[in-house]
């Protein structure tokens, strides 16, 4: 009797803590920061859209250290395209109604402004560590804000969140999907996932980047194509779907108008979880790229937000809504506002699987979603490992302590993946939300304090482009201190001249 009660109490405590962290204050902070940065950059995510795509395949060949811009983009996409795009979208609709997707779009559009700023800052303050670039919030908080203690707090949060809290969300989604489609026991799925993950992460960032640049874009394109086919088959429903989404988003829908607060909250929360804008994990990957100017990777990372939310999440959402494979519940009262004719339960991967099943048949739909989710979620776990490893590197530096800590992290994340396959979806998502929310609080405040440096870098980049030059970054010229990597790079260039 005692153990079940204890388990229930722990689950309630996790849910309560998640609710505290994801208060309306964080929702408005993320929205406000995204709008603020978009205005200050004069909506760089729109003005420089063509350049974002071009820079995907550009890299600084003079630098032997680091990974290419496309590999960094693929790794960031790996972290963004996961259960948030399949299960997270279903959850947003289930508790926020169709309008939650519009708020996912809004936070993606505005969040691309935040992604640009944080990625640019990560490049400005990156370091060369044992032949690899390391960067991210801990580095720009210490060097830019000169706050070592806050940098340590973020690093600890990133290790705990990405190494322990967030991986179970992904493995839980994989386990449920394969249990539903092929009746494979979750423990078996968890064990296989954990073993394969272990084999990949032992190879470090280079192996992770190679796997990500092949798997992530391929699966994203294949999934979107399949979603488009489903929508074509349900073409008459599509106009009504978009009408419901818009009206529900702003409280004008006759059924979902009463849950406008939940609509905004769930859309923003799941949007941030999916696209990671402002969360602080995206800049960790951005700092690993080799570019001639920080703004280049800032633009690439801003584009990855579009791919995640405006493309993959929208494909999932419209597919679910057009086929009516969803329920909507008022989370505050428990009242069922809309019930699917397919007899579905709580929001989970079954919403997407059933939508695909209307085209492929229920068995084939479940299998297709299980396979897609397996690839998406697995590459996301790889990205989580890299985020956590960077936190370990920051905390322990070079030497034997770092080596031991990295191996401890590998063991912990593999164990967390197996553990997540056995727990309920709600616990997994609550733990993930705690991790994402804590990092978001710290990171958004940090970039709000550091944004002038990113704006200066953007103006410098655009000035050099206007003059017909290939932009090069000189931190001293822009009165940016603490950017040691770039200072040393400029000295090398001057010496060659």
Image: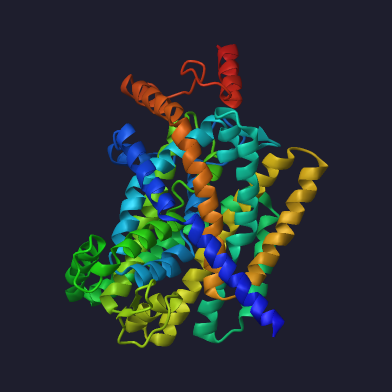
Q: Residue at x 20, y 75 (%)?
A: 237
- Residue nearer the viewer, 452 or 281: 452
Total marks shown come to: 0
In the rendered view, would you say 158 is above or below 491?
Answer: below
- Residue nearer the viewer, 377 or 51: 377
Say whether residue 362 is left or right of residue 474.
left
Q: Residue at x 35, y 26 (%)?
A: 462
- Residue nearer the viewer, 173 or 205: 173
- Residue nearer the viewer, 445 or 293: 445
Query: Is residue 265 visible to the viewer in this orientation of the structure?
Result: yes
- Figure quadrant of residue 381: bottom right
In the rendered view, would you say 391 is above or below 22?
Answer: above
- The N terminus is located in which quarter? bottom right
- The C terminus is located in which quarter? top right
- Tell me residue 117's x, y (percent): 43, 37
- Tell me residue 96's x, y (percent): 34, 67
Q: Residue at x 66, y 71 (%)?
A: 419
- Figure quadrant of residue 299: top left
Say whether residue 418 is left or right of residue 57.
right
């Amino acid at each position: 009797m005692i153990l079940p009660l204890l388990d229930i109490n722990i689950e309630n405590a996790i849910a309560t803590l998640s609710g505290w962290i994801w208060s309306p204050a964080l929702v408005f902070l993320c929205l406000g920061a995204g709008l603020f940065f978009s205005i200050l950059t004069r909506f760089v995510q729109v003005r420089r859209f063509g350049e974002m795509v071009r820079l995907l395949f550009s890299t600084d060949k003079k630098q032997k250290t680091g990974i290419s811009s496309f590999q960094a983009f693929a790794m960031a996409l790996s972290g963004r395209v996961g259960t948030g795009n399949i299960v997270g979208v279903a959850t947003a609709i289930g508790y926020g109604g169709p309008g939650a997707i519009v708020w996912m779009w809004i936070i993606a559009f505005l969040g691309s402004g935040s992604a640009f700023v944080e990625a640019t800052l990560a490049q400005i303050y990156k370091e060369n560590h044992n032949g690899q670039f390391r960067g991210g919030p801990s580095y720009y908080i210490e060097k830019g804000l000169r706050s070592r203690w806050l940098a340590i707090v973020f690093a600890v949060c990133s290790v705990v969140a990405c190494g322990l809290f967030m991986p179970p969300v992904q493995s839980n989604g994989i386990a449920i999907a394969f249990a539903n489609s092929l009746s494979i026991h979750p423990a078996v799925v968890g064990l296989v996932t954990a073993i394969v993950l272990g084999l990949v992460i032992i190879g470090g960032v280079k192996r992770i980047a190679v796997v990500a640049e092949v798997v992530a874009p391929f699966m994203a394109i294949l999934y979107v194509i399949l979603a488009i086919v489903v929508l074509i088959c349900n073409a008459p429903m599509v106009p009504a779907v978009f009408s419901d989404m818009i009206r529900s988003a702003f409280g004008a829908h006759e059924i979902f108008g009463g849950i406008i607060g939940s609509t905004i909250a769930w859309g923003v929360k799941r949007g941030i979880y999916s696209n990671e804008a402002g969360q602080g994990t995206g800049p960790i990957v951005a700092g690993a790229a080799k570019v001639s100017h920080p703004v280049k990777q800032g633009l690439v990372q801003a584009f990855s937000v579009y791919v995640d939310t405006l493309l993959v999440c929208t494909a999932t959402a419209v597919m679910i809504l057009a086929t009516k494979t969803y329920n909507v519940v008022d989370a505050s009262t428990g009242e069922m506002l809309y019930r699917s004719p397919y007899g579905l339960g709580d929001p989970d991967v079954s919403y997407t699987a059933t939508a695909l099943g209307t085209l492929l048949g229920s068995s084939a739909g479940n299998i297709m979603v299980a396979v897609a989710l397996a690839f998406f979620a697995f590459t996301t776990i790889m990205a989580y490992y890299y985020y956590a490893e960077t936190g370990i590197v920051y905390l322990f530096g070079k030497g034997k302590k770092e080596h031991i800590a990295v191996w401890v992290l590998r063991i912990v994340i593999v164990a967390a993946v197996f553990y997540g396959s056995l727990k309920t979806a709600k616990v997994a998502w609550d733990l993930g939300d705690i991790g994402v929310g804590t990092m978001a609080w710290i990171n958004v405040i940090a970039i709000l304090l550091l944004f002038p440096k990113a704006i200066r870098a953007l103006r410098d980049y655009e000035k050099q482009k206007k003059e017909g030059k290939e932009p090069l970054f000189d931190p001293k010229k822009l009165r940016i201190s603490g950017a040691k990597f770039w200072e040393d790079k400029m000295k090398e260039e001057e010496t060659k001249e």
